[in-house]
Image (cartoon, rainbow, N blue to C red):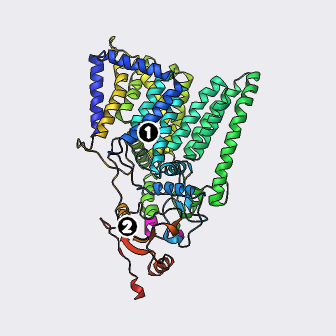
C-alpha cells in the first residue's frame, strides 16, 4: 500500500509539473538557499546528516522498536560481537559442539562466526557503550549516511551532496532491514563511500590524508563484503593508476611520495590485521572463516557457472542444516540451471534491490533522465566523472548477477553510487522544460518532499492502519518483522529462575529452522543454552555435562512452541 501511495504522489507531481510548475516556488527557493548556505560548510553538512540519521532512528523507536534477531546471519554477527567483548577473536570448540552446530557459525577448528568482522565490531561497540548491540546498528547507519554525504561532496556541489545524504537518511536510516535488524549492510556502504569519496580528492588535492582514507575504505570493504568490495576496489584502483600514468614526471614523483606510500602503509596494515583475524579462527592467514564453513557444510556453488559439490552427509548431523542446504539452497540452485530460470532469478533480485534502494520516487529522476536523454544527457555528453560512476555501478551489478545468491545488502558497497546517479539524473532533469514550462524544476523539488511525506506516513502507518506486507528482509515499504517462534520460548525462560538447557526437536520439513539454536561466546556460562536433539544417548551426555540446569524440550514444528520439562525415557 505504501508503494502504491508513493506512486500516486508521483503521478500528482508529474501532473502539477506540467500544469503549475511554479507552484510553491518562493518557498522552495527559500529552502534551496538554506541548502546552498549549509552545503558550503562541508564538515557541518556531514555532521548534520549523521546526527539526523541517529536522531531519526531514535525518535521512531516506539514505532520501530529494538529488533529481535531472527535470521541466523544476525545471530552469527552477534556471536562475533560477544566474542570480541570477551577479549578474543575466536572461541575454543565447546565439548558438546555437535549439539550446537548452526548456520553461519564454525565449530572447528574454532567456535566462531563465519563473517568478516566489521558488523560485529559495530555491534560490540554499541554493546560496550550502552549494553545494547542495536546501538551499534544505529551508529553504523549514521556513519554510513555521513560518509555518503562526504563521498558526494567529492563529485558534486555541496548542496547536492547534502541533499543526497538526507535522502539516504530518509530511505535507509529509519526503516528497512539495515536499520531494523543485525544483518549489516551499512559497514560495506561506509567502505564504498570512503573509497569513492577519496578518489576525486586525491586527484584534486594530492593530500596524504585522502590516500589514508582510500586505504581505510579498501580495508573496510575487505572486512565487510569481500567479493563485492574487491570488485569496487579494483575499479577505484584502476582509475587511480590510470590517472597517475597520465601525470607528468615531476607530478608523478610527488604523487608517489604523498599518495602511494600512505596508501600502501594503510592497506598493508589492514591486510596484516585481516590475515591475523583469519589465522586466529582458521589457523591459516589466507583461509577465511567462510571458506572453512563452506568446505565443511556447503554443497551449493557460489557462482552461476559452477557445479554442485558432493553432499556433505557426514557433517550435516541435524535435520535443520539438511533442510537449509538440501532443500532451501538447492531450490535456488536448481532455478538457475536453465536460461529461463536464471532470467527469472535475476528479475526477482532486481525487484528486491529496486524496492530497497530506489522505489518509485527515486526511480523518477532516472526514468526522467532516460526520457530526456536526447536533450543533453546522452553518453557522449556525459563528463568523465558521470561515466566513471555509471560504469562502476554497472560493473559491480554485473558482479552481483553471477553470484548464485544475492540480497540487497550484497550491493551495499555501491549505495553511495546509487544515490550519486539519482542526484546526477535530478540535476539534468531540473533544467528540462516543456513548452517553456519548467516542469523539471518542480519534479526535482517534489522528490525530497515526497520522500519526507512518505517517511511521515511510514511512521504513522500502524496507527493509521495502512496495510503493509511482511518479509524476512523488509524494505522501507514493509512492516516490521514478526518475532520468531524461539523468541517467545526465550522470553519465557528469561523470566524463569535458574539456568536452562533447551533441547530443540526439528521435524523434517517444518520450515522453522531459522534462529532456533544460537548461543553466545561462552556457552558453558550462558544462562540459556540452546542445543539440537541428537537422540537419547547423545542427549544424555549433554544433560550430564550441563548438570544442575533445568532441561527443556521444544518442538520447532509447533505453531506456538512451548517448552516442556525434558525426561529421558530410556533411563527409566
Residue beneath the point at 47% across and 57% down: 75
Distance from Cα at disc 2 to Cα at disc 1 = 33 Å
Q: Return the residue nearer the eye: 515 or 513.
A: 515
The picture quadrant where one finds residue 233 is: top right
Residue 311 is at least partly visible in this image: no
Farthest residue toward the top?
436
State yes or no: discs 2 and 1 in contact (Cβ < 8 Å).
Answer: no
Which residue sits furthest bottom? 572
Instruction: State left or right for residue 284 relative to residue 159.
Output: right
Q: Which residue is mark 2?
A: 493
Query: Quadrant location of the N terminus?
Result: top left
Q: Is residue 476 magenta?
A: no
Quick one: label 2 or label 1, which is nearer the N terminus?
1
Residue beneath the point at 71% across and 33% down = 260
Check disc 1 and report the residue beneath it. Answer: 54
Instruction: Give residue 225's position: percent from left, percent from top.
Output: 54, 46
Amino acid at each position: 500500500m505504501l508503494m502504491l501511495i508513493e506512486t500516486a504522489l508521483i503521478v500528482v507531481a508529474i501532473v502539477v509539473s506540467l500544469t503549475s510548475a511554479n507552484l510553491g516556488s518562493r518557498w522552495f527557493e527559500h529552502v534551496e538557499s538554506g541548502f546552498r548556505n549549509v552545503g558550503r560548510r562541508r564538515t557541518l553538512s556531514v555532521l548534520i546528516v549523521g546526527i539526523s540519521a541517529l536522531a531519526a532512528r531514535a525518535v521512531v523507536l516506539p514505532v520501530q522498536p529494538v529488533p529481535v534477531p531472527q535470521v541466523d546471519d544476525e545471530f552469527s554477527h552477534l556471536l562475533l560481537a560477544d566474542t570480541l567483548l570477551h577479549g578474543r577473536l575466536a572461541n575454543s570448540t565447546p565439548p558438546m559442539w555437535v549439539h550446537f552446530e548452526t548456520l553461519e557459525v564454525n565449530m572447528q577448528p574454532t567456535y566462531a562466526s563465519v563473517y568478516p568482522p566489521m558488523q560485529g565490531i559495530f555491534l560490540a561497540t554499541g554493546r560496550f557503550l550502552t549494553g545494547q548491540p542495536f546501538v551499534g546498528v544505529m551508529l553504523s547507519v549514521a556513519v554510513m549516511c555521513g560518509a555518503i554525504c562526504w563521498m558526494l561532496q567529492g563529485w558534486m556541489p555541496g548542496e547536492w551532496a547534502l541533499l543526497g545524504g538526507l535522502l539516504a537518511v530518509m530511505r535507509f536510516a529509519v526503516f528497512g532491514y539495515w536499520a531494523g535488524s543485525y544483518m549489516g549492510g551499512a559497514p560495506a556502504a561506509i567502505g564504498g563511500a570512503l573509497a569513492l569519496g577519496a578518489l576525486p580528492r586525491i586527484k584534486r588535492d594530492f593530500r596524504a590524508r585522502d590516500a589514508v582514507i582510500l586505504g581505510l575504505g579498501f580495508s573496510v570493504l575487505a572486512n565487510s563484503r569481500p567479493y563485492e568490495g574487491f570488485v569496487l576496489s579494483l575499479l577505484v584502483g584502476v582509475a587511480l593508476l590510470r590517472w597517475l600514468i597520465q601525470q607528468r614526471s615531476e607530478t608523478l614523483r610527488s604523487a608517489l611520495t604523498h599518495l602511494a606510500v600512505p596508501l600502501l602503509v594503510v592497506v598493508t596494515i589492514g591486510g596484516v590485521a585481516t590475515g591475523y583475524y583469519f589465522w586466529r579462527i582458521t589457523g591459516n592467514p589466507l583461509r577465511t572463516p567462510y571458506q572453512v564453513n563452506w568446505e565443511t557444510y556447503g554443497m551449493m556453488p557460489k557462482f552461476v557457472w559452477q557445479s554442485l559439490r558432493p553432499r556433505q552427509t557426514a557433517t550435516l548431523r541435524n535435520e535443520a542444516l539438511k533442510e537449509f542446504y538440501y532443500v532451501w539452497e538447492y531450490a535456488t540452485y536448481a532455478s538457475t540451471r536453465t536460461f529461463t530460470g536464471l532470467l527469472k532469478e535475476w528479475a526477482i533480485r532486481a525487484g528486491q534491490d529496486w524496492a530497497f534502494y530506489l522505489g518509485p520516487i527515486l526511480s523518477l529522476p532516472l526514468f526522467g533522465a532516460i526520457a530526456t536523454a536526447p536533450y543533453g544527457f546522452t553518453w557522449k555528453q556525459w563528463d568523465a566523472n558521470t561515466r566513471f560512476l555509471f560504469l562502476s555501478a554497472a560493473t559491480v551489478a554485473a558482479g552481483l548477477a553471477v553470484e548464485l545468491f544475492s540480497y540487497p545488502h550484497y550491493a551495499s558497497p555501491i549505495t553511495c553510487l546509487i544515490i550519486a546517479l539519482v542526484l546526477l539524473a535530478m540535476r539534468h532533469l531540473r533544467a528540462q522544460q516543456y513548452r517553456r514550462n519548467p516542469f523539471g524544476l518542480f519534479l526535482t523539488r517534489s522528490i525530497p518532499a515526497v520522500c519526507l511525506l512518505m517517511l511521515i506516513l511510514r511512521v504513522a502507518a500502524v496507527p493509521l492502519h495502512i496495510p503493509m506486507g511482511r518479509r524476512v528482509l523488509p524494505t522501507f515499504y514493509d512492516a516490521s518483522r514478526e518475532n520468531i517462534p524461539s523468541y517467545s520460548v526465550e522470553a519465557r525462560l528469561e523470566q524463569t529462575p535458574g539456568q536452562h538447557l533447551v533441547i530443540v526437536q526439528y521435524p523434517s520439513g517444518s520450515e522453522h529452522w531459522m534462529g532456533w539454536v544460537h548461543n553466545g561466546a561462552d556457552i558453558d556460562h550462558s544462562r540459556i543454552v540452546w542445543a539440537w536433539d541428537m537422540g537419547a544417548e547423545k542427549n544424555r551426555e549433554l544433560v550430564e555435562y550441563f548438570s544442575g540446569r533445568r532441561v527443556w524440550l521444544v518442538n520447532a514444528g509447533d505453531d506456538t512452541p512451548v517448552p516442556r520439562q525434558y525426561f529421558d525415557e530410556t533411563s527409566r
